[in-house]
């Protein structure tokens, strides 16, 4: 017997099917989907591969065929529907088949027979403290590692890298300096980092009577599943309308009939409450996939899924690859969230893959959000998705909060400063007197990269594209320029003028969560403050600890970045403040308005979820902006109508597809030279294409982050009638350019500008 295999993690040069002989002693254990070890290449190095097909004969010289060395896993690691997905994902996202296998078969499966872990420990606490005190280290990563080990003690290298987003090379550098040691040990006594495996009790297990709207949504989804008539549903419901109840009721019916459910949530480590709801209602049939699990824990969860013991798979975007048995339903909660799109190779979209899997398995897909992505709502209006609406909050006593716009220009004149307005301070004082809680959202992602007019608060926008321009340093002459990352329009910063009021005075306005925390301690010295941002949540379990403290009312104020706006339910929170809301629009992405509206609406949804009404304050230098008016009235449709008109006018998604090519090199002069060669090729190639594809090419343009990890980066933006047309350009570039001289990355749905 012979078999065709795909090498896990295969590069482009070896990304094809290879034929191997199945020895007689392994014939009973090898089947399609098996994970095997094979001798590969002239040196017969052992490689991991997945069997995709078995065959009785081989047309050719059998003497050159090598034998499979061993079977790594006794049961197949991939289901038939996963095998059928490999080519589709490879074609859609411009990656190798080996890349897809790597996504579907995690490393914990390959290595699970060897439970040894690499641990990191300080050689000397005193030496580490002395090094930190002397400030001789120049790497922030090295400093963070030493501080982490001083605080946490010995830990696995995997935990360290995951918690601090550092690399193995950075850990090795500290070993070379004689500050840490690496040791291999068996790690049998691992403690789970996610929510406890016990089913949560109390409110998490309570059943709720569904509203008429919820019943109608559940009935529609279940009808599609029962009739094996797969469809994609967009569950559009205001915050607090009970979308989770709809998901749980559908999932309960599916697992009662023996089927499986994939339940995806954005950034799973930030949503312990959601996990508790799912576990509390669906019991021990739930498997949770989590980036901070150890290999042993991850393998146990994955194996429970593969064997069918786990019927509900909860995870982030990677959960879409889970080897579910009899998959009947895929749920994407907060479908608008950008974390469902991978920003590293392969740049896949979990939404796209969910629909691909639906076409193969016949399962239904439910996309849920209070603020759907523009593309999803357009698809629902066009009939590609079935639209289900929840227009009211699930609990009749829980009313939508009152939303109050605050003009910060007037507040600064009154002496409030630029952080906390007087109306917000007064509302906070009242809330504290009534033993209620406050959430303050301050999202600074990318805000320091543009200029904001001091006169009217508008960012400097491109005259062609209506998106905020990005500030770049000119390394050669020390000046600064503003660049549009869509069309390449450039203007020296000293020549910039406000498109609205004509002013020429600009500032990089903004303040951070740490400064806000300091101010709150001064203004409300008797109130406990919790801060939830990237700095305060580096350690495993920190998200859960902060959320549980706030839920238990150990603090009255929670401040943080966008992570506090997602899926949290605090009944005693009656005041929410959205600070520096203008700066959400100061992004070079064409999705800036959409994201600002989504974030404000999601944050506002944290207020008034209990018996007491909530109030939301949106602090802005230009509260008359239509976007803020729509957010104040929670009017998604009005926002959508304005946004879709803008997208149509500029031929942006969903009306045309946008793709991005990034060229990165360590030498700046060489980058410019090769970017110009690539630009000439692209323009010539596009000029010969059929007009029906509607190609447009822009670039080369410096990337938003021009210099990254010692490499300079230039971007090309391509518009076309659809993603397939863009992919055809990508494939041609992959064939015609030597990747060693032209290291290119491709994205047919870029999320950032």
Image: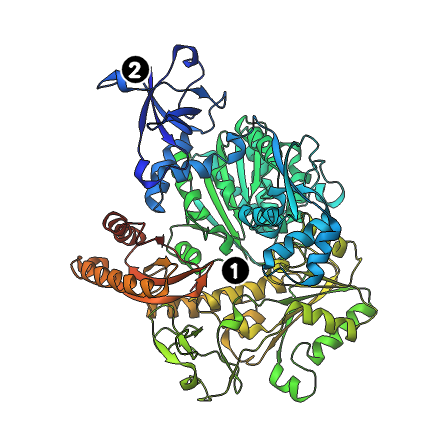
- The residue at the point 61 percent across, 50 percent down is 177
Residue 194 can be seen, yes or no: no
- SS of the residue under disc 1: loop
- SS of the residue under disc 2: loop
Q: Residue 553 in the image: state x and y as whole percent.
A: 79, 57
Q: Residue 223 in the image: state x and y as whole percent.
A: 48, 39
Q: Residue 39 in the image: state x and y as whole percent.
A: 38, 24
Left or right of residue 348, residue 369 in this image: right
Of the numbered discs 2 and 1, the one sitting upstream in the chain is: 2
Q: Nearer the viewer, mark 2 or mark 1?
A: 2
Q: Which residue is mark 1?
A: 371
* Whole-number angstrom distance, CA of label 2 to CA of label 1: 54 Å
Q: How is the image coloured?
A: rainbow
Vertical placement of 525 versus 102: above or below? below
Q: Nearer the viewer, residue 37 or 130?
A: 130
Q: Nearer the viewer, residue 365 or 182?
A: 182
Left or right of residue 337, residue 126 in this image: right
Q: Nearer the viewer, residue 162 or 618?
A: 162
Residue 359 disc label: none
Count the labels in the image. 2
Pick the quarter of the image with the N terminus. Answer: top left
Location of residue 478 (image quadrant): bottom left
Q: Residue 81 in the image: state x and y as whole percent.
A: 41, 32
Location of residue 240 (image quadrant): bottom right
Vertical placement of 454 versus 178: above or below? below
Residues at discs 2 and 1 in contact (Cβ within 8 Å): no
Q: Which residue is mark 2?
A: 56
User: Extreme left residue here?
Assistant: 688
Pick the quarter of the image with the C terminus. Answer: bottom left
- The residue at the point 72 percent across, 35 percent down is 198
């Amino acid at each position: 017997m012979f078999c065709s295999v795909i090498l896990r993690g295969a590069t482009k040069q070896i990304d094809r099917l290879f034929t191997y002989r199945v020895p007689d002693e392994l014939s009973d254990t090898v089947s399609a989907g098996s994970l095997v070890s094979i001798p590969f290449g002239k040196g017969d190095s052992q490689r991991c591969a997945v069997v995709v097909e078995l065959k009785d004969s081989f047309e050719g010289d059998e003497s050159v065929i090598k034998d499979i060395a061993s079977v790594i896993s006794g049961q197949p690691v991939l289901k038939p529907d996963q095998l059928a997905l490999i080519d589709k994902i490879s074609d859609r996202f411009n990656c190798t088949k080996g890349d897809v296998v790597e996504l579907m078969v995690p490393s914990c499966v390959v290595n699970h027979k060897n439970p040894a872990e690499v641990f990191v420990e300080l050689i000397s606490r005193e030496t580490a403290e002395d090094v930190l005190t002397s400030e001789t280290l120049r790497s922030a990563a090295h400093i963070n590692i030493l501080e982490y080990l001083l605080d946490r003690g010995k830990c696995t290298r995997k935990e360290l890298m995951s918690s601090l987003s550092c690399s193995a090379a950075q850990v090795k550098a500290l070993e070379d300096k004689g500050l840490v040691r690496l040791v291999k040990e068996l790690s049998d006594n691992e403690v789970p980092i996610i929510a406890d495996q016990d089913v949560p009790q109390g409110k998490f297990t309570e059943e709720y009577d569904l509203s008429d709207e919820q019943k109608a949504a559940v009935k529609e989804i279940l009808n599609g599943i029962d009739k094996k008539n797969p469809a994609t549903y967009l569950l559009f419901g205001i915050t607090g309308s009970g979308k989770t109840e709809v998901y749980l009721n559908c999932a309960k019916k599916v697992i009662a009939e023996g089927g499986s459910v994939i339940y995806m949530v954005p950034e799973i480590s930030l949503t312990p409450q959601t996990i508790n709801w799912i576990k509390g209602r669906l019991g021990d049939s739930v498997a949770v996939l989590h980036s901070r699990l150890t290999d042993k824990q991850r393998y146990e969860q994955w194996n429970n899924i593969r064997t069918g013991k786990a019927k509900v798979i909860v995870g982030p975007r990677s959960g879409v690859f889970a080897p579910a048995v009899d998959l009947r339903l895929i749920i994407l909660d907060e479908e608008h969230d950008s974390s469902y799109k991978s920003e590293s190779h392969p740049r896949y979209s979990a939404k796209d893959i969910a629909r691909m899997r639906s076409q193969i398995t016949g399962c239904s897909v439910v996309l849920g959000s209070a603020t759907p992505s523009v593309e999803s709502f357009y698809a629902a209006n066009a009939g590609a998705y079935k639209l289900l609406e929840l227009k009211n909050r699930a609990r009749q006593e829980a009313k939508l909060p009152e939303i109050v716009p605050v003009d910060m220009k007037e507040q600064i004149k009154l002496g409030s400063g630029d952080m906390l307005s007087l109306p917000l301070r007064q509302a906070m004082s009242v809330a504290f007197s009534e033993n209620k809680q406050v959430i303050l959202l301050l999202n600074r992602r990318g805000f320091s990269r543009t200029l904001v007019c001091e006169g009217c608060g508008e960012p400097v926008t491109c005259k062609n594209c209506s998106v905020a321009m990005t500030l770049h340093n000119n390394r050669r002459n020390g000046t600064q320029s503003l660049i549009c990352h869509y069309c390449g329009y450039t203007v020296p910063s000293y020549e910039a003028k406000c498109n609205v009021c004509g002013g020429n005075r600009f500032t990089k306005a903004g303040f951070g969560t740490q400064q806000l925390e300091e101010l709150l301690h001064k203004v409300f010295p008797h109130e406990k403050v919790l801060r939830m941002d990237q700095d305060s949540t580096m350690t495993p379990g920190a998200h859960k600890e902060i959320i549980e403290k706030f839920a238990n009312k150990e603090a009255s104020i929670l401040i943080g970045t966008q992570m506090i706006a997602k899926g949290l339910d605090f009944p005693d929170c009656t005041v929410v403040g959205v600070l520096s809301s203008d700066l959400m629009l100061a992004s070079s992405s064409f999705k800036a308005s959409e994201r600002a509206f989504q974030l404000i609406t999601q944050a506002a949804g944290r207020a008034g979820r209990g018996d007491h009404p909530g109030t939301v304050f949106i602090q802005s230098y230009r509260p008359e902006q239509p976007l803020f008016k729509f957010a104040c009235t929670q009017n998604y449709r009005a926002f959508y109508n304005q946004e879709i008109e803008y997208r149509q006018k500029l031929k942006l998604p969903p009306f045309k597809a946008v793709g991005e090519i990034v060229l990165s090199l360590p030498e700046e002069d060489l980058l410019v030279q090769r970017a110009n060669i690539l630009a000439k090729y692209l323009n010539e190639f596009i000029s010969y294409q059929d007009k029906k594809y509607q190609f447009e090419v822009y670039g080369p343009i410096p990337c938003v982050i021009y210099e990254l990890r010692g490499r300079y980066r230039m971007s090309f933006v391509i518009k076309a009638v659809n993603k397939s047309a863009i992919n055809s350009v990508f494939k041609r570039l992959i064939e015609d350019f030597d990747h060693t001289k032209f290291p290119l990355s491709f994205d047919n749905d870029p999320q950032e500008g």
